[in-house]
Amino acid sequence: MAVIEQNQAKGIISSINGPVIKGRNMVSFKMREMVTVGEKSLIGEVIVLEGDIGTIQVYEETEGLKVGEVILPTGRPLSLNLGPGMLKNMFDGIQRPLAKIQEVSPIFIPEGIGLLSIDEAQLWEATITAKPGDILLAGAVFGLVKETEVIQNRLMVPPNLSGTVVSVVPDGSYTIKDMLVKLRDEKNDIHELKMAHQWPVRTPRPTAYRQETLVPLITGQRIIDIFFPIAKGGTAAIPGGFGTGKTMTQHQLAKWSDADIIVYIGCGERGNEMTEVIEDFPKLIDPRSGKSIMERTVLIANTSNMPVAAREASIYTGVTIAEYYRDMGYAVAMMADSTSRWAEALREISGRLEEMPAEEGYPAYLPSRIAEFYERAGSVQTLGGDEGSITIIGAVSPAGGDFSEPVTENTKRFVNVFLALDKNLAYARHYPAINWLESYSGYIKILSDWYEDHVAPDCIELRNKMIELLYQENKLLEMVMLVGEDVLPDDQRWVLEIARIIKVGYLQQNAYNKEDTYVPLAKQYAMLKAIEYFYEKGRAGLKLGIPTSQLKNQEIISAFIKMKYTIPNDDLSGLDELKNQIDSYYDALFKRYQD
């Protein structure tokens, strides 16, 4: 990492408080500037400047650091090296590749290894599309590199640069450090365009304009796709206490969502959970390409035993990588697991800075930080003229499952989909344990046209009808607890039966079953339509005076409960057979009562 030689100013460490360092003689340093600290050249960032006193948060362990050691400026903010080589890779919270770190130290991340990044020696086959004389605006594509078997990296002019092409290299093999195109800007300065460019993690990458999100992110999970859909370019939160399945739900979304690129951030989670992700993802087969899902995935791991300041930065690292691929015109899904651990890192650093604490010890700026993070989601028109999107799905881990705590409450203010996980459902082995009464989606209205055009004209209407039945069931269960089910009228007992089928046969989904782990929209709708058919058939029987005890046919009910396993995703003829079975039984029953 190059340190600006001409800047002779050096800070001197005056106090050390965990990852928070104070230094004197720092008048010439800049806010948010990246610095190197001490003899080991630890990576840090300036977060407070008061006169000649500066405060730095260090992204590495500070054990062994001494007062009086030197702080050196770098002249630039904490930035990422964005270019080919990020897909299929696993990074720590500040984009240092874990595979390279393991070569240096097999067990722990050592201090002072510097700001490693994507491989600078690897050769990539580049096709240069720009020609001398071309005018390239910010974000324009000047070349192509096949980064993986399924993703083409579109080499872009950095967002803060534009000009006329002076010269280009021929197509061939180059590293990310090689000059590919020379560009002359309006001041007649010459700039070299390479495969990679740097961008500050805390600065959102600019776009031409933001646009409305009109297409859903298809996940293959029934309770999400039909009941609480997430828009591409939207925001969602998955809050839940310990053991409710937050990580598993995010794994399912990462594995099966129809996004082009997946950025998965393990932020402060247990090491064994990230180990599972790192081991499982390379084995997963992408249903769209037949290749490993890692071909379109970037993993960022900052586990609970890694430096707390790097955990705070990991969220920004992930979203900056996501914006880079968004600017190429890709739909990116970003999973953050979990934002509560990120907020805890903010709280710890704030405490060491002796800032005035707000609710539950979190800093007063927690809401604005959460808002800034989720604001970086969106569907956009890129500077290069393409359409791209970032969908941010953040897990929240409230202590004791208390949704009234500050992180959950503030997250709820800034996201449009709230998928509340319920410990009672989890303990009953009902997964995904998403509570259909507490969850909501703010995208129903804007996505309704898409569902009408691509699924069925009555899809949203059917969804609303089924949710209404679940709300009715919730009220009826309160009465049942007081007086028992036997005193309920037959029409209400029928509602209870259908609601049970919706919950067990439809909303419960098995991630380990080949047919049920991912369900296409056509089958999701057809299953719900069959349940509605059964419900309406029963209501017709109730009008003839048939008691619920006779309307219940255990063979048919059992078929509904098992249909998610017994009916293949690519052959829905079994649902027609189920409807024929319903008609056969109920037509005979109705005939007996009519006669």
Image (cartoon, rainbow, N blue to C red):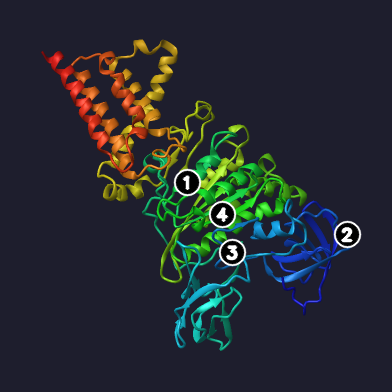
The amino acid type found where label 1 is placed reads Leu
Distance (Cα) linking label 3 and label 2: 32 Å
Q: Which residue is mark 4?
A: 373
Q: Are marks 2 and 4 in contact (CB under 8 Å)?
A: no
Q: Badge 4, how many Cα within 10 Å: few under 14, some, many 20+?
A: some
Q: Which residue is mark 2?
A: 67
Q: Are marks 4 and 1 in contact (CB under 8 Å)?
A: no
Q: Which mark is residue 253?
A: 1
The amino acid type found where label 2 is placed reads Val
| Between marks 2 and 1 in the image, the one whose residue lies nearer the viewer | 1
> Residue 354: percent from the left, percent from the top?
77, 49
Residue 409, above or below 400: below
Q: Which residue is mark 3?
A: 203
Q: Badge 3, how many Cα within 10 Å: few under 14, some, many 20+?
A: few
Q: Nearer the viewer, residue 145 or 92?
A: 145
| Between marks 3 and 2 in the image, the one whose residue lies nearer the viewer | 2
Distance (Cα) linking label 4 and label 1: 20 Å
Disc on the earlier residue, 3 or 1: 3
Q: Badge 2, how many Cα within 10 Å: few under 14, some, many 20+?
A: some
- Could you tell me which secondary element the residue under label 3 belongs to? loop
> Residue 524: percent from the left, percent from the top?
33, 40
Which residue is at 30% across, 21% downward? Answer: 555
Disc on the earlier residue, 2 or 1: 2
> Residue 15: percent from the left, percent from the top?
85, 56
> Residue 480: percent from the left, percent from the top?
41, 15
Q: Nearer the viewer, residue 50 or 41?
A: 41
Which residue is at 54% across, 39% downward? Answer: 246
Disc on the earlier residue, 4 or 1: 1
The amino acid type found where label 3 is placed reads Thr
